[in-house]
Image (tube, rainbow, N blue to C red):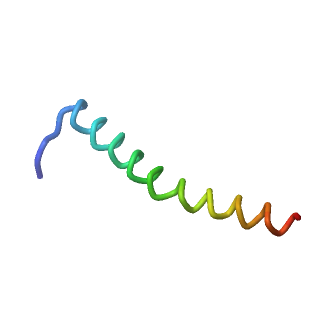
Amino acid sequence: MLIQTWGEVLQNSFQDIGIGLANFIPNLFVAIVIFIVGWI
């Protein structure tokens, strides 16, 4: 097991959050478009 510094842990956490947002935003956009089309 490797011992990581707090800086490395935080950097990896923020990278994971960024990747998660990059995957989530397109899905959110499609959901909003479908909702608007269904509303009309």
Q: Residue furthest top?
A: 7
In the rendered view, tell whether residue 19 sits above or below residue 14. below
Q: Nearer the viewer, residue 11 or 23?
A: 23
The x and y percentages for residue 28 are 61, 57
The x and y percentages for residue 4 are 16, 39
Taking 12 as reference, is 14 left or right?
Answer: right
In the rendered view, tell whether residue 2 sits above or below residue 29. above
The x and y percentages for residue 3 are 13, 41
Q: Count the marks: how many? A: 0
| Residue found 36% across the figure and 40% down from its top | 14
| Residue found 67% across the figure and 63% down from its top | 31
- Where's the C terminus, which quadrant? bottom right
| Residue found 38% across the figure and 52% down from its top | 19
Q: Nearer the viewer, residue 18 or 13?
A: 18
| Residue found 54% across the figure and 58% down from its top | 26
The x and y percentages for residue 37 are 79, 66
Query: In which quarter of the view is residue 12 placed?
Result: top left
Taking 31 as reference, is 10 left or right?
Answer: left
Q: Nearer the viewer, residue 38 or 12?
A: 38
